[in-house]
Amino acid sequence: MNVDDQLTPALTLRGVSKRYGPVVACDAVDLAVRPGEIHGLLGENGAGKSTLMKILLGLVHRDTGTILRGTEPIEIDSPQVAADLGLGMVHQHFSLIEPLTVWENVILGDTGRVDRAAACAQVEQVAQRYGLPIDPLARVDRLSAGERQRVELIKCLRRDPSVLILDEPTSVLTQAESAELFTVLRRVVQAENRAVILISHKLAEIMAATDRVTVLRRGAVAFHGTTADTTAQELARQMVGRDVSLRAEGAALGLLPVEPQSPAGAPPSTDPAGAAPAADPTTPAALRLRGVTLRVGGLPVLDDLHLDVAPGEIVGLYGVEGNGQATLGELLSGLLVPDEGAVEVGGRPVELTRPGTLHEAGLGIVPEDRHHSGVVLDMSVAENLVMKSLAGVCTRGVLSRRRMHRIARRQMAEFNIVAPSPDTPLRSLSGGNQQRVVLARELSAGPKALVAAQPTHGLDVGAIEDMYVRLRQAAAEGVAVLLISTELEEVMALADRIAVISSGRIVGVLPTAEATAERLGMLVGGVAH
Amino acid sequence: MSAADNIATILSSGARLTVPLAFAACGEYVAQRAGTLNISVEAMMLGAAFGSIAVASATGSATIGLAAGALVGVAVAFVHGNLSHRVQINTFVVGLVLNALVLGLTSYLITVSTFTGHQVWQVSVPVLRDIPIVGPMLFVQRWPVYLLLAVIPLTWWLVQRSRWGLELRAVGENPQAADVSGIHVNRRRRQALLWCGLLAGLGGAYLAVGEVGSFNQNMTAGRGYLVIAAVIFGAWRLGRTLVGCVVFGLADAMRLALPALGVTMNSQLLIAAPYLLALLAMLVFATAHREPRALAQPFQRGTT
């Protein structure tokens, strides 16, 4: 790949490194982006993409290395400097102020007098040039995700950047909106000779939209070359290293570490006899959602959702991100109360307006964002492990550290939690070990049902395999497992049945044996019902 | 006295009691829109009240005293802003400490000094002051009241129409986004606090050299907290905030007028009345409204 030297790159990174304590986020990264190209930056979560982006934006300072704009070395001290140097960033999540209007957002960061008419005219002019229709007077909080992204693009392009950086731009877009975005990007590079860096972890998108591609793995450049000369398989291999990706190919190649257990022979629910009298012998579901509806601002996020999970069964809830999965996860964590409908655990409806009732009823949860609602990072491993069952380590309100440590040691051994001691603050553990702490706590409580929401997000391959083994084991022991996932391969590899969620509704339930990527894709897209 | 006279008296005294609240509320409104739940507004007002009398007494000019009071407010704001938006000490802790410090300091200083009384001059508009009921309220007031009438639209314009105000609102809603847009978040918040200090200082100084003509211990008596309540009551909108100030001012005026009207009530209970009203008002009005999203959240670059 000796094509790098044909043109002076718009932006060059040489040996850029950044460490956070013992963690190397970026390891001597070289990157050259030429004017007139879309350069893909591919990598898994935690591969160093976002740190690199923050360095280019002046939010984080590199430890070593040089950054050149054209041939001239630059220092990016702050976002303002980055903007002045012609580095424009389209943020997905945090650069629009929702209660402000479109034009107010667009001129934010300028200097001089505020001129509403001129600002609106400029917005419309940029909008027209790039085919990004938007009402400059609209308030941003009333806009859809696709429209918000147009505002981001307009804000960025109005400043006439020489390098445009897009961070996971399609993560909240529909297929059509994504296509529209790539059309605009093509125009930006071809007609105006700007450089575009497209940060993504989606292979298909990188293959379709980029001219050249750089793959990051564990902070270092694993591969770079011309997109047309490589294949998706090659990029996938480079992205995850020597191990074949469980998510992308493992299931198809039959390389999973453990044979799936047959749910047919699974033992019945392990709850003590008499504790949960079966309300109705024809409904053996350990977890049942009945007509769960939740509206936000009048719009249903969960819309009359029905789902049963039987003891010993893994049901995969599959769908594109943003179709109500996060809301369902919060609801099953007890953080939200539905407007209508009921949640039944072990055949009994659960009172959802009091905290802790779902746990008492025997529902375990591995939440999607463990830092948000799964663990307390600044408390110790032991404290996090006993947090939900303090009765076992308390005598009349006094904590027994001895009992707490004994329980913690046992669970640490059982779930392979690697930590120097039970007193280690959870913050200092790796993501995989933090997730094991959550899983250990939830499974040790002997749940009837377990909800695992995106349980492998951001984990390394080893931790993912471990998570898969544990979930299968839990099901084999009679726990009803609801796996909420946006990863098709994960659902296909683990679930006995797959329920597809779209716009807050279950649009179809298939046995995994009958589910093909094509059928699921059609359900997800709302084609078949 | 006739009923009309009684009403005119209460309205007029209510207007006077509203003025210090309204000055400070214009400041607190700006601070909160920028994301600082500034509780040291009490310290700003009390320190300014003391400073204004001290300087008025030394110079013989109530107007110079008023200006000095405003500067005391700015000084308190400067300390608060740098401690909480530069050194990043929790803003509530800073506010509480400043309130206690200024209360103790002024209470001590007033015992060891003797000041002569001073009051800014009164403006009395001929003819118009004779309008029944509202005439005395609107047209017989001390001159800072008319300054307030200029400060209110100026504050609104600054927040809603100037670039500074746009950036201020952005900072109060989403500091990370403001930061990546190139706005110095903590600098804007310090500037908002300085504006708050200036106006709270004017409010506190008005209480001393405008309303009463002297300083006594703990003269503000929690008016700063009422101002915070007014901003919340007003759902972070200036007009409604000022309505809240008027309500609290009238409640205060009623308290003072009731004994004269022959109503006997426990005076301590009466003193508590505006605060009780504030609590009820917040209960009714505040829950439905959206506060600036980053209110009372510190900002440090790199944490998203």
Image: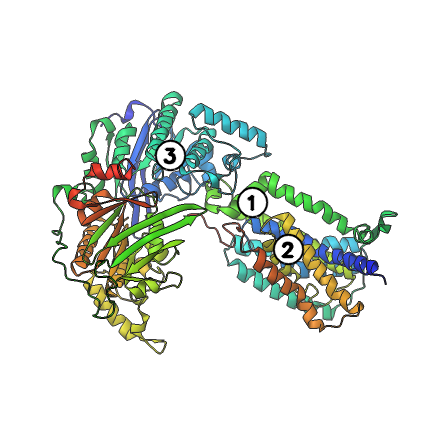
Residue to which mark 2 is pinned: B75
Residue beneath the point at 25% across and 50% down = A456
Chain hosting mark 1: B
Q: CA gap, disc 2 to disc 3?
A: 43 Å
The amino acid type found where label 1 is placed reads: Leu
Observer-nearest of B134 and A490: B134
Residue to which mark 3 is pinned: A165
Q: Quadrant of the C terminus of chain A?
A: top left
Residue to which mark 1 is pinned: B168
Q: Is residue A184 left or right of residue B44?
A: left
Circle nearer the viewer, 2 or 3: 3
Q: Quadrant of residue A43?
A: top left
Q: Residue furthest bottom?
A: A396
Chain hosting mark 2: B
SS at badge 3:
strand
- Circle 1 residues within 10 Å: few <14, some 14–19, many ≥20: many
**x, y percent for residue A363:** 28, 61
Q: Quadrant of residue A466?
A: bottom left
Chain hosting mark 3: A
